[in-house]
Image: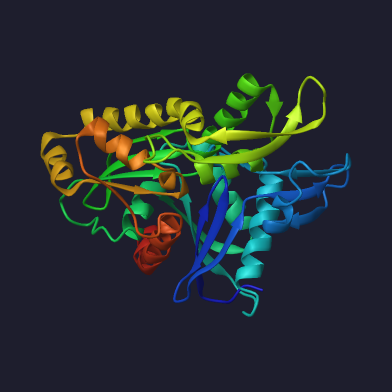
Amino acid sequence: MIGSGLDIGIDLGTATVVACVKGKGIVLREPSVVAMNKETKEVLAVGKDARKMIGRTPNNIIAIRPLRDGVISDFSATSKMLKYFINKACSKNTFGGFRMMICVPSQITEVEKRAVIDVAMQTGAKKAYLIEEPVAAAIGAGIDIAKPCGNLVVDVGGGTTDIAVISIGGSVVSNSLKIAGDKFDKNIVKYIKKKYNVLIGERTAEEIKMKIGCVYPRKEEITMEARGRNLDTGLPVTITLRSSEIMEALMEPAIQIVEAVKSVLEKTPPELTADISDRGIYMTGGGSLLYGLDKLLQERTGINVMIAQDAISCVAIGTGKALDNLDALDAKSRK
């Protein structure tokens, strides 16, 4: 159960949930997947165990991702998933109220924000706070966001890419687009279906992306075998894929991310643009690890691009650090 006086930071991602407990650091990293009985709505598995079931369940069981494009699409499943993760992360503590900070995309609606707060309160939190993903990512990347200096952060997650120019602790210009890791996977599925008339699953597409995917020419062409279903015969088939053809499949969403970054730069005040030009662009999130995305962004903007040291955990680490200021937030809300 949850401990009294505990502060928990949650990166509630479309693909992965990362939990950070104040004083302990990251205590949990699990896929955002829930497996449940269709009729009774009983939760059968959560996280890694549920992810193994995607595409492999009988008719009465469904394995779903309750978050889509960075926001809650299934309130009940998200609430059950989060409750399970929090109890798993803090199992040795005694029961009591706790405070929670959750990351959200930079441009979600008030209704979507309310849904996140409601989910947090349903897990037993006595207070729930929201922090924008790019701000948390910047803190996690070790950037001192309190200074009057422009920092451009590009957080490429599973469902959304959040871009923000941060100065004096907040976003000056920001943009959030529903193009990220999931979109890359879908494009691979679509490309293989069109070119080879073969249908592959989401997990296979993700594996292809991670092993041979790229959006900038590799020094050497690499290949891998993938299994799918031939749409003519309905039988299993193995195909050999090259990195150059997967690059072809991934270029469209990658260019859209680059164009969104350029759009944010165009709206940025000149003084902050000069700071960004000197300091470079910081990339965070699992999607930033796609081969060549940093090189492509650097080539198209002319600004040096750096990938954060722990890109996948950056947002959760930043949330954990932001937890140190929760007392100040509490004081503000009391006023």
Quadrant hosting residue 30 = bottom right
**Count of marks overlaid on the render:** 0
Task: Give the color scheme: rainbow, by chain, secondary structure or one colour.
Answer: rainbow
Give residue 66's quadrant in the image: top right
Residue 214 point in image, percent of width and height: 44, 38
Above or below residue 256? Residue 103 is below
Looking at this view, is 250 or 232 the one in front? 232
Place of residue 195 in the rendered image (x, y in percent of width and height, measured from the top left) = 61, 21
Say left or right for 135 vs 235: left
x and y percentages locating residue 51 in the rendered image: 70, 51
Q: Residue at x 12, y 34 (%)?
A: 270
Q: Quadrant of the N terminus?
A: bottom right
Residue 243 in percent (x, y) is at: 49, 36
Residue 165 appears left or right of 269: right
Res. 158 in view: no
Q: Nearer the viewer, residue 52 or 91?
A: 52
Please determine whether, in this image, residue 175 is positioned above or below residue 232.
below
The answer to whether residue 297 is seen in the rendering is: yes
Residue at image location 59% in from the left, 45% down from the top:
207
Task: Name above or below for residue 302 compared with residue 49.
Answer: above
Please, which residue is most extreme toward the front here? 220
Q: Quadrant of the C terminus?
A: bottom left
Residue 272's image quarter?
A: top left
The residue depicted at 37 percent of the width and 69 percent of the height is 324
Q: Is residue 71 left or right of residue 326?
A: right
